[in-house]
Structures are given as structure tokens and as C-alpha cells.
């Protein structure tokens, strides 16, 4: 029989939990609600006055500012945000939603679950390391490369939303992010330590591998020293870039072959991640390249940066990685914002192509603008007819300018409202109507066609003297250099078709 404890939140609401601990970390002990819909986590060490004030703001004003605004429901799946404070027999704690079932391992580790992870939380570390992925994680949990792009997009959105609210996570890492590559999902956890610049300082400096170089470099200084860097929004942006890089390339951007101190491992680590940090793919300084002789077989091919360089992430992400790990590595003001990553990931997802090899582990790759695209993961070349749609936006009536945004056409590819109208962004503010596809593509009798499902303004304007309206329900055959207006409104888009045949 369950031993159920009843207590009250600080605002007087009843809370129940089963008096059987389900988890214990460095700071909290965690208990399930009877129906497992939420957890109650008690602090091992009572929070001080400032920490209590921060928790009240996190469960109150800050929570309201995110979840009770337009698009607030969207964030329920991206954050495991504490909902209330609770006290029981002198212990203080928080109430938080239970993680979605997607964030628990369905299958055990390889070799009959030798690690006993079946049913455990999917910490991001399992999916960010080539060695762990190849050696230990069940292949059915690994998902594909497109889902890893979607995970990066969700993380960028989550960080963008926190920063818009004036908050910083302060300890963004694969320990504090749960991901599900099999469905392309992510959830940011451990929200109770949020930083508010000038009001609530960080409790920790971060998690190794994700701490910004300036924080490590100045860690020896007193917290009150004006030269000391503490976790903030700028350091979140370093951690976000590291996470996205690791989730796409399964290696750490700073852990190369360079040795800074032969006699002191601790000092070598401090320099490698701090003052002397150097991007492993820096094109002008090759001294921190990963040595091929040091790579384990279970880390191949991912740690071989010559075989799988960051350029495989495409024309939008690769420059941001360069910006983050070269320009912004030691200059926080130069780091890409969360919005920069979000925009680049949206465009990259539109530029992905399914691999023709049914046995390809990654199954998707980014089109590299070559006439004969090839999957970088398995080497399978594309064969067939590939329409590439170049998107243009109207800044004034009848005048269209390029958006530096392209959409690849493959079986099942869809058009959405954000493709049709430049004023609509694919984010948390989309309405239910805007989430529905407005058209799709099919290969029919050797030609590609666009089927119009809900674009009343669809117009073929290739021949200026003979413009052709395409009514809803009809299909338009795609031709090379064809010009198609998707929406005749002020912010409507024009697409120019390029057809590659291999």
C-alpha cells in the first residue's frame, strides 16, 4: 500500500506525494505524485532568503510571463517549469510536471541493457557522443539526422524565449536537457536555478564541456571582482552552440589534440576549455585538430573532421558555428543569438534531402548546392529529378527580393503558411490553421507537381503575358526557371524553380 503524504503549497493548494524517493541529486530528493503527473522535489540544503525569493519569482511572475502569453501552451512541452513551492516538516521544495514518456528510454542499452538504462531519463549525453551512440545506445533510440536538427531548433527556441523574458538558464548542458531523437523532441529542465542579471546571481558556474571560456578563465577571482565572469545570457549562447554542434556532429568543438600542459592535467584542462580554448575546426590554426591516431573505432567516422567536417551542416549553420567558436569563442558579444540559430535551423530543415540508401543510419542530409548531391554519411549519390525552390519576398507591390531561403522538393514534401507569406514565422505563435499544410508535392508521370490545397492566390507568372491561376484542388506541373506566386498579398512569396537532373 502506498504511503501518501499530503501537504500544501505556499499559496495554500493541496499537494500529495508518495513517500518513496525516486531520485536524488546533489541538491534535491524527488518523489512522485500518486498519479505520477507531477513530482515534488525537496532541497537537501534549505534555500537562503535570496534563493527563496528567486523560487517565488520563477513559480510566479516569470512563469506567468511565459506560459500566460500568446503561444504559452507551446512552452509546456519545451520546459519542465516548476509550478509551486511546497514545505513539509521543515523541508522546502518545488512542484514540477513529470517528464513526458518520450524522455525515458524505451529500450535498454546494447548487450542486454548492461547499463540498466531502460526506463531511465534520456539525458542528452547519450546522444551527443559518437562513442556512446555507437557502443551503448540501442539503435532504435537514435532517431535520424533530421530529428537532431529539430532538437536543435527546439533548444534554440527555448533559449530565445528565456532570454526574451530577461532570464538565463546558467547551466545549459546535456545534463539539463532531455532529448528524444526518435521523435525529434527536447525539454529543458532544472529551471529552479535561473539567473536574472543584477538580481539573482547563478548558483553554479555550469557543467564541464559547456562552461564558457571566460567563466573558466576568471574562475580564480572573487565573485565580487568586476573582472570575474559569471553565467549569464552570453554564456548560455556558448552552451547552446556547443549543444547544437554535438547533437549534429557527435563530438565536442574544443576537445582536440592540443596539449597545453604536459605535467598538470588539471591545468591542461583549464587552459583547453578556458584562456587557450581553440576550435577543433579552426581553418587558420590547425594545432587543435583531433589526431587520427587517437580516435577509437567506436568514435569513427565522427571524430574524423576531414571525413565529416562542419560544412556538412549546410550554408546556414556552418557560418554560425564559425562565428560561435572563432569570433565569439573569446568575445561573448560576437556569439550568435538564439534567434540566429532558430532562423538557420528552420532554413536548414527546408534544405534537407532524404538519403536514397535505405540502410543509411542518418537517413537525411543537407543539400550542398552541388549539381550531384551526395549523402556525406554513407556516400550514396542522389539520382533523379530534384526541384529546388528559391523563395523571394515582396517588399513592395510587384517587387521581390531573395530571402536566402530554399526548399527542396521530395516525395511528401509540404508547403506551409510560413513558406507562402513572409510575415508568418514558424514558431510558438502559429495558430492551428497556420500549422496545417497548404500544399504538397507529388511525382506524377515523370514530372513533379505542386498540389494546391489552400492557396487561393497561387499564380504561375512565368509568362508575364499569360499568367495562370491555379485554383484550390488543382495541381501545377513544375518546370525549370518557372516563377510562381504563392500569395498575392503584400507579404506574399514568389518561388523560382530550379530543376536538377542527375
Image (spheres, grey):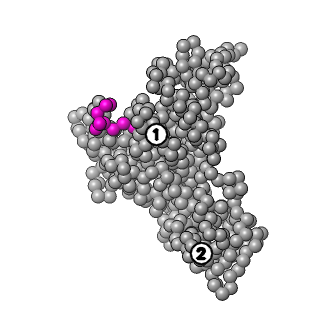
Give the camera-side residue of 289 and 480: 480
Residue 122 in the image, given as x and y percentages of width and height? 56, 37
Of the numbered discs 2 and 1, the one sitting upstream in the chain is: 1
Q: Confirm whether the magenta stretch covers residue 297.
A: no
Q: Is residue 342 above or below residue 91?
A: below
Q: Please identify the residue farthest to the bottom as the structure is shown.
A: 465
| Residue 397, label in figure | 2
Residue 266 in the image, given as x and y percentages of width and height? 28, 33
Query: 298 left or right of 268?
Result: right
What residue is pinned by disc 1?
Answer: 168
Q: Secondary structure at mark 1?
A: loop
Residue drawn at (52%, 71%) of the image = 402
Residue drawn at (77%, 69%) of the image = 473
Q: Mark 2, mark 1: which one is toward the viewer?
A: 2
Residue drawn at (45%, 35%) of the image = 195
Give the camera-side residue of 100 and 238: 238
Q: Secondary structure at mark 2?
A: loop
Where does the magenta region start and end? 223-231
Classified by dominant secondary structure, the portion drawn in magenta counts as: loop
Q: The N terminus appears in which quarter of the rendering? A: top right
Amino acid at each position: 500500500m502506498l504511503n501518501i503524504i499530503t501537504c500544501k503549497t505556499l499559496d495554500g493548494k493541496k499537494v500529495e506525494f508518495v513517500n518513496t524517493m525516486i531520485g536524488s541529486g546533489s541538491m534535491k530528493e524527488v518523489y512522485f505524485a500518486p498519479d505520477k503527473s507531477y513530482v515534488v522535489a525537496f532541497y537537501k540544503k534549505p534555500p537562503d532568503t535570496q534563493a527563496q525569493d528567486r523560487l517565488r519569482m520563477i513559480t510566479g511572475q516569470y512563469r506567468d510571463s511565459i506560459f500566460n502569453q500568446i503561444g504559452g501552451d507551446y512552452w509546456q512541452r519545451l520546459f519542465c517549469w516548476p509550478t509551486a513551492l511546497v514545505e513539509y516538516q521543515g523541508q522546502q521544495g518545488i512542484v514540477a510536471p513529470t517528464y513526458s514518456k518520450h524522455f525515458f528510454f524505451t529500450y535498454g542499452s546494447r548487450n542486454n541493457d548492461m547499463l540498466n538504462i531502460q526506463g531511465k531519463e534520456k539525458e542528452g549525453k547519450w546522444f551527443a557522443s559518437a562513442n556512446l551512440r555507437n557502443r551503448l545506445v540501442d539503435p532504435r533510440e537514435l532517431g535520424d539526422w533530421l530529428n537532431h536538427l529539430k532538437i536543435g531548433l527546439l533548444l534554440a527556441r527555448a533559449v530565445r524565449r528565456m532570454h526574451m523574458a530577461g532570464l538565463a538558464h546558467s547551466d545549459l548542458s546535456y545534463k539539463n536537457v532531455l532529448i528524444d531523437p526518435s521523435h525529434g523532441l527536447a525539454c529543458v529542465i532544472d529551471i529552479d536555478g535561473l539567473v536574472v542579471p543584477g538580481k539573482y546571481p547563478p548558483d553554479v558556474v555550469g557543467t564541464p564541456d559547456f562552461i564558457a571560456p571566460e567563466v573558466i578563465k576568471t574562475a580564480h577571482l572573487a565573485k565580487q571582482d568586476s573582472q570575474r565572469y559569471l553565467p549569464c545570457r552570453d554564456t548560455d549562447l556558448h552552451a547552446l552552440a556547443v549543444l547544437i554542434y554535438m547533437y549534429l556532429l557527435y563530438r565536442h568543438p574544443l576537445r582536440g589534440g592540443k596539449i597545453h600542459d604536459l605535467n598538470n592535467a588539471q591545468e591542461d584542462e583549464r587552459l583547453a576549455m578556458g584562456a587557450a580554448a581553440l576550435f577543433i575546426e579552426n581553418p587558420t590554426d590547425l594545432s587543435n585538430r583531433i589526431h587520427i591516431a587517437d580516435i577509437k573505432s567506436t568514435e569513427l567516422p565522427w571524430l574524423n573532421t576531414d571525413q565529416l567536417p562542419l560544412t556538412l551542416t549546410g550554408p546556414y549553420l556552418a557560418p554560425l558555428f564559425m562565428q560561435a567558436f572563432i569570433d565569439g569563442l573569446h568575445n561573448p558579444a560576437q556569439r550568435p543569438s538564439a534567434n540566429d540559430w532558430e532562423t538557420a535551423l528552420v532554413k536548414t530543415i527546408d534544405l534537407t534531402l532524404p538519403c536514397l540508401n535505405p540502410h543509411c543510419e542518418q537517413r537525411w542530409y543537407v543539400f550542398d548546392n552541388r549539381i550531384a548531391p551526395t549523402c556525406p554519411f554513407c556516400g550514396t549519390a542522389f539520382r533523379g529529378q530534384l526541384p529546388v525552390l528559391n523563395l523571394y519576398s515582396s517588399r513592395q507591390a510587384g517587387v521581390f527580393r531573395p530571402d536566402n531561403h530554399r526548399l527542396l522538393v521530395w516525395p511528401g514534401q509540404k508547403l506551409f503558411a510560413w513558406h507562402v507569406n513572409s510575415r508568418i514565422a514558424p514558431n510558438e505563435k502559429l495558430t492551428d490553421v497556420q500549422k496545417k499544410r497548404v500544399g504538397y508535392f507529388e511525382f506524377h508521370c515523370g514530372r513533379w507537381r505542386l498540389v494546391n490545397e489552400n492557396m487561393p492566390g497561387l499564380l504561375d507568372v512565368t509568362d508575364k503575358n499569360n499568367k495562370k491561376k491555379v485554383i484550390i484542388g488543382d495541381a501545377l506541373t513544375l518546370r525549370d526557371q518557372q516563377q510562381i506566386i504563392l500569395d498575392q498579398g503584400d507579404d506574399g512569396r514568389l518561388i523560382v524553380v530550379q530543376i536538377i537532373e542527375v
